[in-house]
């Protein structure tokens, strides 16, 4: 998701840059057009410079409120508006970035008070299978505690730890590990 | 379906009293008068070396294809079973061909086996019987030409001739070396080999089911059909049930599968999470880990097998998990992160007193498993680098020895019931697979190859 968002930004930046270049060149360098074959005395005006402000803006995430309200639970979870929180190795501390994610999740949970969610705790493969059950639990608990502190009722937030049994990225490198150390949010009722 | 096939096979064996064993009349004393009489029934090697055995294929007393095939399997499996404990040296099989095959106990060419420096010779016969086959086995002292061990085995279950060899091997180890062999024991583990996916999840998640296999990895059989995440199986002390952690109802709970009755029991239920059941040595109780108090703490609880009588064993604001009982049942070893990363501790099974820390020099130690007597050791998983390795600590001297050395990542050790072998999970061959290794670090053997296989446990019987 992060990668996609960066790509979106890069695309927007390059489009803007291209537009900026295009704006200068044509009106200055282009000679006056040859006279038309048909009778007309007024010269054709040069094309209007493109307006960089009108460049198409790539939408951030195709999630609109009405879409959320009408989506099925599966569709909602497939492209979930609730973002995961990621953790450091052996840690269940919620980082400043994680807090921001949880703030956004809390906003959504307030907007949709009927939602009930399960917070899943997950771990990377470096810890042991046995200890990771408890570590995943602690990660899910940390996320829940933060949401409760934002005013979300604990009754809406169930917890389950999967340890390292369900990695999101099957890879064996740090980029995979980083994705697998997470609290993952599943909407179970709406 | 699989339950009933398995149960049927075992039940049939029990009903006909298989295997029946008949002890032969005691052998005659050897010619030398200096030998104490209690040594006459054991084979010895020269100069304290292990006895050198020859184990040729068994003799088929009828020429039908089934009997001939069973005779061949028995000799080969018995060789592997006996070799597993290293109590004997073996005359290599490829030189057996130079020796005329005996067709009965009366025609054994002892002189030729003597030329190969064999101390002992196993001769077995197989014949059809009313129910299945009859197997007769003798172990000869090649020098005296006397039988020092002889038994007859009969009953049904020609369907699994390997089991005859396993029983013979355990009998020979017990009579010759006073050793409890593990040839009849089994392993249990979790596997995703069937490629099934969890239902009702957006992410593709593999089902894991509980499997059992013979100690040598043969006859791998699925036990559970839950279609969910079933993990961390543990054999009951009587070898008739498996407790495991199942996510079938959303939260992880402890279930028991009674594998010979195809029945299932719920030890825990409800919204609280429960993991990692460990049987008390008498089989009446389970120690489990649960984060039920909330706040991210996990503590140990002891619960009766029927789900009654839950009591809290540890009470510490940290993670306390991975329980294993001492062989006497008086103590429980576990891991706790009360000082940072997890370390191994021991506490009385009554929960009274302070937990005593066992691992001193590890950055991260989990999944202790207490060895059976006569050893008093705890094997555990230690973080040694990017991955984990299996180590063993002697509880008397606190000396640590390492069994694996960074070949993939290695974890989840489980002792064989004689304490001489350890099953564990390793990624050295790619996916997670079950391996066994001797407590000395030798004899590494891969048992599984299909899918991911993990969380092994070794049956006591």
Image (spheres, coloured by chain):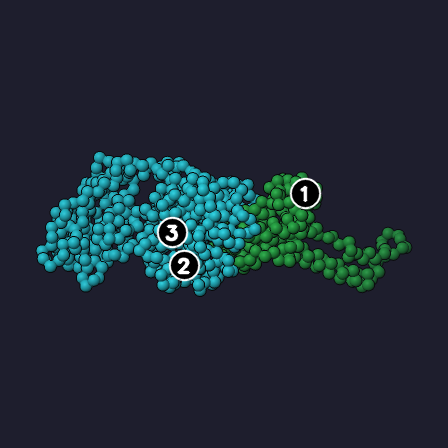
Q: Is residue A77 visible?
A: no
**Looking at the image, is mark 2 or mark 3 nearer the viewer?**
3
- State the image quarter where residue B46 is shown: bottom left
Where does residue A147 sit, x and y in percent of width and height?
Answer: 64, 49
* Neighbour tally class for label 1: few under 14, some 14-19, many 20 plus, Cα within 10 Å: some
Q: Residue at x 44, y 64 (%)?
A: B361
Label 1: chain?
A
What colour do you see for chain A? green
Label 3: chain?
B
For the residues beneath circles 1 and 2, the answer to whether they share a chain is no
Relative to A114, is B394 on the left or the right? left
Q: Provide the secondary structure element on which disc 3 rests.
A: loop
The relative height of residue A33 versus residue B68 in the rendered view (above or below) is below
Q: Which mark is residue B116?
A: none
Q: Which mark is residue B390?
A: 2
The relative height of residue B114 versus residue B287 in the rendered view (above or below) is below
What colour do you see for chain B? cyan
Which residue is labeled 3 in the image?
B330
Relative to B108, is B286 on the left or the right? right
Where does residue B286 sit, x and y in percent of width and height?
Answer: 42, 45
Which residue is labeled 1 in the image?
A112
For the residues beneath circles 2 and 3, the answer to whether they share a chain is yes
Residue farthest to the front? B353
Q: Residue at x 73, y 58 (%)?
A: A16
Count of labels shown? 3
Contact between labelled residues 2 and 1, with CB atoms less than 8 Å apart: no
In what quadrant of the picture does the N terminus of chain B appear? Answer: top left
Q: Nearer the viewer, residue B159 or B315?
A: B315
Q: Residue at x 65, y 50 (%)?
A: A149
Relative to B304, is A181 on the left or the right? right
């Amino acid at each position: 998701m992060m990668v996609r968002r960066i790509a979106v930004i890069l695309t927007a930046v390059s489009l803007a840059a291209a537009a900026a270049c295009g704006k200068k060149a044509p009106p200055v360098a282009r000679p006056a057009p040859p006279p038309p074959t048909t009778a007309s005395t007024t010269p054709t005006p040069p094309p209007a410079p493109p307006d960089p402000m009108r460049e198409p803006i790539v939408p951030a995430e195709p999630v609109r409120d009405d879409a959320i309200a009408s989506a099925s639970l599966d569709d909602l979870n497939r492209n979930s508006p609730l973002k995961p929180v990621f953790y450091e190795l052996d840690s269940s501390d919620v980082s400043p970035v994680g807090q921001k994610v949880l703030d956004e999740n809390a906003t959504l949970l307030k907007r949709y008070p009927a939602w009930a969610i399960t917070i899943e705790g997950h771990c990377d493969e470096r810890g042991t299978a046995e200890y990771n059950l408890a570590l995943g639990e602690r990660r899910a608990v940390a996320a829940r505690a933060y949401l409760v502190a934002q005013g979300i009722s604990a009754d809406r937030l169930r917890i389950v730890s999967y340890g390292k049994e369900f990695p999101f990225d099957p890879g064996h490198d740090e980029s995979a590990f980083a994705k697998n150390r997470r609290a993952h949010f599943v909407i179970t009722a709406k | 379906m699989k339950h009933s096939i398995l149960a049927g096979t075992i039940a049939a064996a029990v009903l006909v009293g298989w295997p029946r064993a008949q002890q032969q009349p005691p052998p005659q004393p050897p010619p030398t008068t200096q030998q104490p009489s209690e040594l006459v029934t054991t084979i010895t090697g020269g100069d304290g070396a292990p006895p050198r055995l020859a184990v040729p294929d068994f003799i088929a007393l009828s020429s039908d294809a089934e009997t001939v095939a069973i005779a061949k399997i028995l000799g080969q499996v018995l060789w592997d079973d006996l070799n597993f404990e290293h109590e004997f040296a073996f005359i290599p099989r490829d030189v057996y061909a130079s020796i005329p095959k005996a067709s009965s106990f009366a025609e054994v060419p002892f002189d030729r086996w003597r030329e190969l420096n064999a101390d002992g010779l196993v001769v077995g016969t197989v014949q059809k019987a009313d129910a299945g086959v009859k197997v007769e086995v003798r172990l000869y002292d090649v020098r005296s030409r006397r039988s020092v061990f002889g038994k007859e085995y009969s009953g049904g279950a020609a369907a699994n001739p390997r089991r005859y060899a396993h029983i013979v091997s355990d009998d020979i180890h017990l009579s010759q070396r006073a050793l409890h062999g593990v040839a009849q024991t089994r392993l249990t583990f979790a596997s995703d080999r069937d490629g099934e996916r969890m239902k009702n999840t957006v992410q593709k998640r593999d089902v894991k089911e509980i499997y059992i296999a013979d100690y040598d990895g043969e006859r791998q059989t699925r036990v559970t059909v839950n279609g969910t995440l079933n993990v961390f199986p543990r054999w009951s002390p009587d070898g008739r049930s498996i407790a495991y952690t199942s996510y079938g109802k959303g939260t992880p709970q402890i279930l028991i599968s009674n594998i010979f009755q195809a029945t299932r029991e719920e030890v825990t239920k409800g919204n609280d999470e429960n993991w990692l059941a460990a049987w008390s040595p008498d089989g009446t109780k389970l120690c489990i880990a649960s984060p039920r108090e909330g706040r991210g703490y996990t503590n140990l609880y002891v619960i009766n097998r029927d789900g009654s009588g839950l009591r809290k064993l540890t009470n510490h604001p940290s993670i306390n998990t991975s329980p294993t009982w001492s062989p006497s049942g008086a103590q429980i070893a576990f891991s706790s992160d009360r000082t940072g990363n997890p370390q191994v501790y021991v506490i009385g099974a009554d929960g009274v007193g302070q937990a005593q820390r066992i691992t001193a020099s590890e950055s991260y130690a989990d999944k202790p498993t207490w060895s059976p007597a006569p050893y008093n050791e705890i094997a555990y998983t230690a973080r040694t680098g990017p991955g984990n390795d299996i180590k063993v600590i002697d509880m008397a001297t606190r000396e640590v020895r390492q069994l694996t050395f960074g070949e993939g990542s290695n974890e989840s050790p489980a002792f064989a019931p004689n304490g001489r072998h350890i099953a564990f999970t390793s990624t050295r061959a790619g996916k997670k697979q079950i391996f066994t290794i001797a407590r000395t670090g030798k004899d590494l053997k891969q048992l599984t190859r299909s899918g991911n296989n993990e969380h092994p446990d070794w049956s006591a019987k």
